[in-house]
Image (spheres, coloured by chain):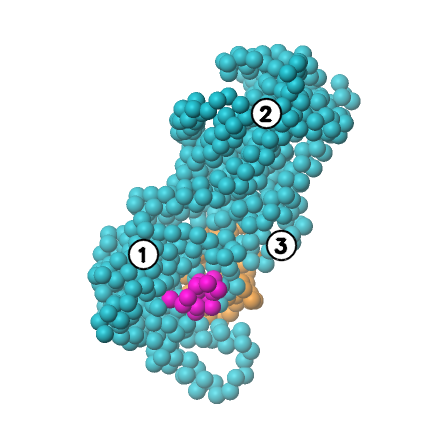
Chain colours: A cyan, B orange
Amino acid sequence: MIDTVAKDFLRKRVALVGMPNCGKTALFNQLTGTRQKIANYAGVTVERKSGECKFSGKIFEILDLPGVYGFSTTSRDEAITKAVCMGDYEGEPPPDCIICVIDATNLQLHLRFVAEVMNLGLPMLIALNMLDLSKKKCISIDYNHLSDLLAVPVIPTVAIRKEGIVDLLNALVLQLTHKTCKSREGSWLRNAVHQKFNDSGNIEHDIANQATEEMIRINDQIRSIIKKCVISSKDSDHIDTIIDAVVLHPIFGSGILVFLLFFMFQAVFSWSQPFTTIIASLVHVIGNFFINFFPPGILKDFLSQVIIAGCGTVLMFLPQILILFLLIYILEESGYLPRAVYLLDGLMMKCGLSGRALIPLLSSFACSIPGIMAARSIPDKKDRLITILVAPLATCAARLPIYTLIIGAFVPDIKIFGFLNLSGIVLFCLYALSIASIAFTSLIFKLCLGQSEASTLLLELPPYRLPRIKDLMISLYNRALIFLRKITGLLVSLTILLWFCVSFPRPPSDAILPAIEYSFAGKIGHFLEPLFLPLGFNRKIVIALIPAIAAREAIISALSTVYAVTSLNQTEVIGQLTCYIKENWTLPTAFSLLVWFVFSPQCLSMLVVIRKEARSTLLASAVAIYLLCLAYFFSFLTYQMATFFK
Amino acid sequence: MRIIKTLNQLNCGESFTIISLLAEGTLKNRMEILGFLPGEVVAVLIKSRSIVGPMIVSLSGTKIALRAGEASLIRGF
């Protein structure tokens, strides 16, 4: 008998539900520690977080469902949360119990959500979270009385300090053994519904009005419940009001925002540099150590150029991604992010983007890969799609080497007005071109895809909170794992393909030209040459563009290969290359190539990330094609105009 | 007798009691879930100077940002 009871408990499923900003994730982290598994729900990009919790010999599987405001609208998160709770989601058995996490400082809002959850009619508990903050705000809650009135067990918790966790688990065990509370039956909610039907007698309103009336009734019920069990001395969130007065001020607020954005950009751009260098040299050292065991030949080439270089590329993005996400998490947890969205919404809306596209686009200026990954925080499907589509147009750090090379070779080092450097101005123009093209293409996409119905601001501004380091670290750790797992496979296999093109067939023994000229890449370059002639690209440039598909910065080493620059010193290579292209290229060609790099989709990793984030090969190919078209068109225009006016 | 207005017509610091929502469908649902229900008092905390810009309102202890277009769908007196 005892055995069966124990087995019965072996793996009970418990779902955490709650509104955004209720401290659900902190509670989840306290319950599961680092024993978390993050995946996606089948077919959608909504994250499925689950973890194990051991308590007095029992194991619970805790499911952290997406934070939602209710179940009546049609958003993806809400549909999934409801389906999982009800056991309607394929491959997800129904949870044995639901823990509804609510914020004690904002009961009016959160109890309305409790009513929605109770309507599902499942066994449930309420975790009355953030009790420390409510005490600070001089709100005292008689939670026993609240529990009686709601007819659901209410357990006070302070998730960030691990208070009330044991009580919560005890209540959970009790709930699962006795199955006492089928929340819908005999509850205050049912009474409300019955009363409504008795009052109106027959149904004379349409369904929408009924829903509204029901909401009003529940809202009134909640008001009376709160009146009975909550004593609140006067409102005292004046600190928040003061912060908001500054942060949301049209002038100071914008200033703070610009400063923060600049800071974030700098951080992703430069803080990651030392880490990237360390990782690169580590990969290099470890790779060389193993490589030395192999005799020179194709196998050695393959290992060093594909496996080690491919993995190295993946790892090198990691610092940027982690730094960006750390900053995003801090902004999100502290409550600043929705305020930044509010400040920028008007401006971004003019370009057909939502205010939430800000962070993804900004970080794309450092590297579009973390930027595209950050786009998952945009709730509206169309807004997210447009953001992903335009993110590759942002001038990422990988374009700087080729920009510097060409500017160094062709733009004279002179000063305008005595202090403005001409090469600086050209670089600035390239950035301006990139920003203008983002604004312009997003506007076009908006017109093509149509105004999204669900694109609204309607944003709750949560109270300011200090982020907790433990929660930040757990989120970051999970983010790193997701990135590595997702990207590595596809990227390495595409790198293999590219390597094959560049290194086969091998050059004949009496070769005078660089090896790449004899390879498939060389032949493709040969074949494509007439196509690129109107752009002013010679065969060597076209060939060099092929290895640059892997990563934009690879264009430098590819150019030095085709121009047969041989030097081990990187600065010497750049110096020699500068001389070569100065002699061999015309000014229109140089400008045309610069413009090509503003638009070109030459980064395999980026396309792989788009493919993974949007879950569509079609979309990734579409991005590649539309960028190629843009690049071709504008390079053509630049070259022809430059030749004409020359 | 007070005049019925929409939320976007209120100035900073003013408040009114909601009578009805002119929104429909998903938007109406989302507004109701956030607490824009008839009978609730809503106060304008911050309003940007441009006519179309977003505003911040306070609604039973919750701060909510919304666009002027969305605010024009909330009627009250």
- Chain to which mark 3 belongs: A
Question: From which residue to which does the magenta span run?
Answer: A80-95
Give the vertical position of A270 relative to A171 (above or below): above
Residue position for label 3: A451
- Chain to which mark 2 belongs: A
- Chain to which mark 1 belongs: A
Label 1 and label 3 in one chain: yes
Q: Disc 3 on helix, strand or loop?
A: loop
Q: CA distance from mark 2 to mark 1?
A: 48 Å
Q: Residue furthest front?
A: A295
The answer to which of A479 and A285 lies nearer the viewer is A285
Q: Residue at x 49, y 29 (%)?
A: A303
Q: CA distance from mark 2 to mark 3?
A: 39 Å
Label 2 and label 1 in one chain: yes
Q: Disc 1 on helix, strand or loop?
A: strand
Residue position for label 1: A52
Amino acid type of the residue tagged 2 in the rendering: Ile
Based on the displayed image, in which of its 4 quarters is residue A182 positioned?
bottom left
